[in-house]
Amino acid sequence: MLDVVVVGAGPNGLTAAVELARRGFSVAVFEARSTVGGGARTEELTLPGFRHDPCSAAHPLAINSPAFRALPLERYGLEWLHAELPMAHPFPDGSAAVLARTVGETAASFGPRDAGAYRRLVEPFLPKWDTLARDFMSLPLTALPRDPVTLARFGLAGLPPSTLLMRRFRDEPAKALFSGLVAHVMAPLGGFATGAIGLVFALAAHARGWPVARGGSQSLSDALAAYLRDLGGSVHTDYEVRRLDDLPPARAYVFDTSPTALARIAGFGNHYGGYRYGPGVFKIDYALDGPVPWTAKEARAAGTVQVGASSAEIGSALRAASREGRAPDRPFLITVQPSVVDPTRAPAGKHVFWTYGHVPHGWTGDLTDAIERQLERFAPGFRDRVLARATAGPPEMAARNANYIGGDIASGAVSGLQLLLRPRPTLFPYRTPHPAVFICSSATPPGPGVHGMSGHNAAKAVWKRLRQI
């Protein structure tokens, strides 16, 4: 009999498997797709030689993850590549705000009226970032805070809505960039604890950057799987699990799946009936004949580019998708241009480019024209560079990854108390009604993103259970 069976080979499932294998347990992972990766895959979606990331492409949380930093993933081929600027936020007049590695350069891009306010916001936390990240991403009750005072100060700054936090800023560059950071998790700007989301992304960029993985996000997943095998674990792909009886006998089962799928497979009925899913995304992967012709020079040097003319425009786009049930006329776009720093991603002189906009949950329309009109505002001539495109609305996103129900790449609405207490309001989120069954997906704390910490935290709960047995 195995000690642990893990269902789902996304970053959280693989991390949980690795953590348990490191403790000497026998572990096997079962994945429905033909390759491991979940939200961290790389495929040729458009033309031969163009390597795209179907979901996550830039990784500020992965490079800062306490779980990943404790693992020897570089020995298994993972290499982080950094663009000249982690992130840029251009404006229609050709100017741009930037999220640079240094606080000073970032503050300077906001202008003199907001430079000081930004420094006062982030500089107190930056020297203690590693401890803060560990404390913040280990909640709740998987580890005692190492620095409870700093964590409490962070909570005071971040728990209010981001709209309240942004009152510190007077001009649009700072407001728009910070609004965009919050929108990365598709949370309404006025929601509970949204200030913390923006702060986490800003601090992560200042601490270690906003990199891409050489060769694509698949290299992170492959490194985790290779390390697991070296630890004695096994990985089985093309293995779809419909019920618990489909799996071999084990002392514990860990699911890197949506709560909906877990309830169906394990027979938990309506146990997760109150779990809410959020808005979806409409994503386009491009093969380009050259780099994106951004008007702002800062955007041409950045790995990630946020596209939204103002904080008001960004807020309107989020409201349309999350509350009004319609696709925005001017969508807020998150874009990543990996080949700016990684030439292995496209043939010589060509580029790959990735963007998505927010749409209502389960939306079935086509946002291509609205996305490209928005891009043309900030990069005139963009359409002339397009060689091929691969589009994916909510139905296609859900088909690529079963955890993205209704196109929700956050695996659950990141709003209200569900931002912190997911998938149920409990201090033991990784447990389920069955004492031998656990959940470790992005539907558990600390939530969405490629960081492995949900798997890391769940592994602790499993380890305690097995030790008790």
Image: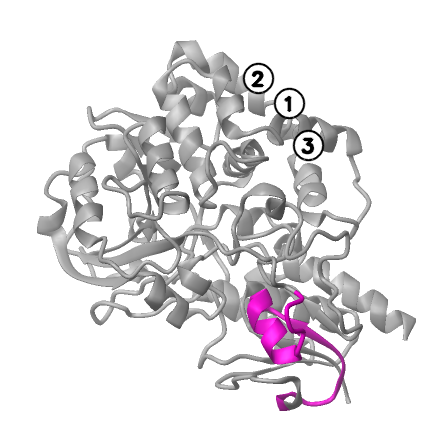
The amino acid at mark 2 is: Arg
Callout 1: SS:
loop
Left or right: 272, with 143 as reference point: left
Work out which quarter of the rendered image holds the N terminus and state it: bottom right
Q: Which of the 4 quarters of the picture holds residue 457?
A: bottom right
Q: Provide residue 297's location: percent of width, then percent of height.
A: 24, 31
Q: Is residue 307 left or right of residue 460?
A: left
Indicate which disc residue 128 carries.
3
Gap in angstroms between the C-alphas marked 3 and 1:
8 Å
The residue at 71%/57% (across/down) is: 429
Residue reaching furthest to the top = 113
Does the image show residue 466?
A: yes
Density class for disc 2 (Cα within 10 Å; few <14, some 14-19, many ≥20) is: few
Find the distance from the CA under tag 1 to the CA under tag 2: 7 Å
CB atoms at circles 1 and 2 under 8 Å apart? Answer: yes
Tell me the quadrant of the picture where the C terminus can be found. Answer: bottom right
On screen, 368 above or below 155? below
Q: Nearer the viewer, residue 131 or 101?
A: 131
- In terms of depth relative to the viewer, which is nearer, 254 or 189? 189
Which residue in the structure is indicated by mark 2?
A: 120
Q: Earlier in the sequence, mark 2 or mark 3?
A: 2
How far, Cα to Cα, is label 2 from label 3? Answer: 15 Å
Q: Which residues are magenta?
A: 246-271
Kindly identify the residue that appears in the image at 22 percent across and 72 percent down.
48
